[in-house]
Image: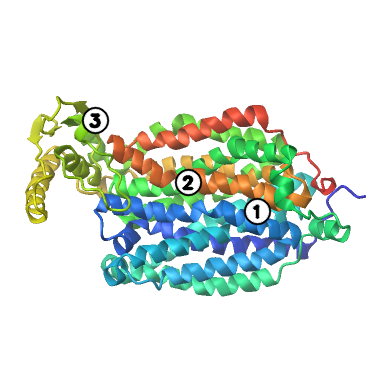
């Protein structure tokens, strides 16, 4: 039996390009919500305070990631039993329809709690469909690729995530520019979701033109397809251990590096540094455009030096440099905020027992203690603070530079009384932090644009190093008969759970501690864990012959 890849004809290259384009449109659908989280939080979660609403919006974004492994199980089994092409049609149809319907949903003001429930349901359906997408696309392209160009060929699939993000940002920026910020925030945000119906039509046409993978057709003709892909993947230790090692030694670090460089960076720019949404999207879009060729470059490099070394080196550098890079982003993105943090540090002095975790995604908690009232204000205004324990039952106070402001207890106040006191207190605190140099928003004239782009490109480079070779590495770990199922699980658990939950978890960590950089421990630890596990338990796969690996 021939064990080397056949020469890829021009028609087969067109099929691979068509697969990548269809995947790009699917990522466009998925990323729209993440790019518009700051606006959708006000549209669908208006019943809670701004900080909780944004975290709740991030959780709704993460909900799509949470179900991706389940989509991987369902569609992976179909892909290994029926074929790769069939799953493409099903997943793209589910994805496109869900995205279009998000643009049609009434807001919280119109239908109340039903609005966020419907939004989360559509996000779950999107994530479920996407769980079947990546494994099929990566497997499909890899099974068409020449033996020693698999990293290069599959890296084009890796660029589709960035292309989809770039396309979504382009549509958002264009719509924002045409309509203006006020109309865009009111109803214009729906336009990018509604436009996706045209992309769905194009994607379905592209997917219908695809041919089945030649490797899968061969094993199907020979009767070698798996009769029970799930049992064979998870019921046999030789395969299950590879799934576990792939998760902790490859995809966990890869996922967090990608989401840190793209979405966490975007949220950090808008929510923490108070850079307006248009400029923040332009910055992320530019950095994505500049780093897109690097995905192909690192995929190509992995064909020469190995997948493992490129991915783990990217994780190592990322884990060690996230904090200084984001401090540089603060200093160059909002220098007034960085200067105020240095010259007028904020200290919250309170009895720790009276302080709650500033994380209220469902809006049920009431932050009415003197400590909670102070911290809620500071968190919503992106003010970095430290904590000092006070004697029991002491009224909390906040020290801003040399100014000390006492809080007040709101537990016994009526709703109207509490609102009146909060209005006065928040105005007092606002005046104090502005006098100390804390800006209400970033001044575009003081932003160091070239340095900010450079730092974002550096984050994008880490993402390219870890993401560019990942498809080839995962494909080569598993035999053809269970490849779709086996590679999809570690990828979607890593990307969906470890990576997808990063923005919400990291911002909750920031809200809990008052340290705007504390959330970076999440991706840093994940990246360094991947380096350790990958070094000792992941084999190098670049010379594996998948054509002989049935």
Q: In this view, does 466 lie to the left or right of 15?
A: left
Q: Which mark is residue 386?
A: 3
In front: label 1 or label 2: 1
**Is residue 371 among what the camera can see?**
yes
- Label 2 sits on residue: 259
Vertical arrangement, residue 393 with respect to residue 161, above or below: above
Q: Nearer the viewer, residue 176 or 92?
A: 92
First in residue order: circle 1 vs circle 2:
1
Instruction: Measure the C-alpha gap from mark 1 to mark 2.
Output: 19 Å
Q: How far apart are marks 1 and 3 (CA)?
A: 44 Å
Q: Is 65 situated left or right of 23 in this image?
A: left
Q: Is mark 3 on a helix, strand or loop?
A: strand
Q: Quadrant of residue 333?
A: top left
User: What residue lies at 22% left-to-right and 36% top-to-bottom?
Assistant: 355
User: Which residue ends up furthest to the right in the rendered image?
Assistant: 1
Which of the two residues, 54 or 144, is positioned nearer the viewer here?
A: 54
Residue pictured at 29% horizontal, 60% vertical = 42
Q: Where is residue 326 in the image (x, y as percent from the top left)?
A: 38, 37
Element carrying mark 1: helix
Residue 360: give x, y in percent of width and height. 30, 48
Where residue 135 is drawn, which disc sits there? 1
């Amino acid at each position: 039996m021939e064990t080397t890849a056949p020469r890829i004809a021009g028609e087969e290259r067109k099929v691979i390009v068509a697969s990548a384009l269809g995947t790009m449109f699917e990522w466009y659908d998925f990323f729209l919500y993440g790019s518009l989280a700051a606006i959708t939080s006000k549209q669908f979660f208006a019943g809670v305070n701004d900080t909780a609403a944004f975290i709740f919006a991030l959780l709704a974004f993460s909900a799509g990631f949470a179900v991706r492994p389940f989509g991987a199980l369902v569609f992976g089994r179909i892909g290994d039993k029926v074929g790769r092409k069939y799953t493409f049609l099903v997943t793209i149809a589910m994805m496109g329809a869900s995205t279009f319907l998000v643009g049609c949903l009434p807001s919280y003001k119109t239908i109340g709690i039903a609005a966020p429930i419907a939004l989360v349901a559509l996000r779950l359906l999107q994530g479920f469909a996407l769980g079947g997408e990546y494994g099929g696309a990566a497997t499909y392209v890899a099974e068409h690729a020449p033996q020693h160009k698999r990293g290069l060929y599959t890296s084009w699939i890796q660029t589709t995530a960035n292309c989809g993000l770039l396309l979504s940002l382009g549509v958002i920026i264009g719509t924002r520019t045409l309509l203006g910020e006020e109309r865009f925030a009111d109803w214009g945000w729906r336009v990018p979701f509604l436009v996706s119906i045209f992309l769905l039509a194009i994607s379905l046409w592209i997917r219908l033109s695809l041919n089945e993978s030649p490797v899968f057709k061969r094993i199907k003709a020979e009767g070698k397809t798996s009769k029970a892909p799930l049992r064979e993947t998870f019921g046999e230790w030789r395969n299950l251990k590879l799934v576990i090692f792939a998760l902790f030694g490859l995809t966990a670090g890869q996922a967090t590096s990608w989401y840190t460089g793209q979405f966490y960076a975007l949220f950090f720019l808008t929510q923490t540094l108070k850079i307006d949404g248009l400029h923040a999207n332009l910055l992320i879009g530019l950095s994505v455009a500049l780093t897109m060729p690097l995905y192909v470059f690192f995929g190509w490099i992995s064909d020469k030096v190995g997948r493992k070394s490129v991915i783990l080196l990217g994780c190592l550098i990322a884990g060690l440099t996230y904090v200084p890079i984001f401090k540089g982003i603060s200093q160059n993105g909002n220098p007034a905020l960085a200067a105020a943090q240095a010259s007028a540090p904020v200290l919250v002095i309170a009895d720790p027992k009276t302080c709650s975790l500033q994380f209220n995604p469902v809006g049920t908690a009431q932050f009415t203690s003197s400590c909670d009232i102070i911290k809620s204000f500071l968190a919503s205004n992106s003010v970095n603070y430290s904590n000092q324990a006070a004697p029991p039952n002491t009224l909390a106070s906040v020290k801003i530079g040399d100014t000390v402001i006492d809080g007040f207890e709101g537990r016994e106040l009526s709703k109207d009384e509490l609102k009146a006191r909060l209005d006065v207190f928040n105005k007092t605190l606002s005046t104090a932090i502005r006098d100390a140099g804390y800006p209400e928003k970033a001044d575009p004239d003081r932003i160091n644009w070239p340095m900010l782009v450079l730092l974002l490109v550096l984050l994008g480079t880490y993402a390219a190093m870890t993401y560019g070779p990942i498809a080839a590495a995962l494909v080569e770990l598993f035999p053809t008969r269970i490849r779709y199922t086996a590679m999809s699980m570690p990828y979607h658990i890593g990307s969906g759970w470890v990576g997808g939950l990063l923005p919400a978890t990291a911002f909750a960590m920031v809200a809990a501690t008052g340290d705007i950089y504390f959330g970076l421990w999440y991706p840093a630890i994940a990246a360094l864990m991947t380096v350790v596990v990958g070094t000792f338990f992941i084999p190098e796969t670049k010379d594996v012959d998948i054509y002989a690996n049935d």
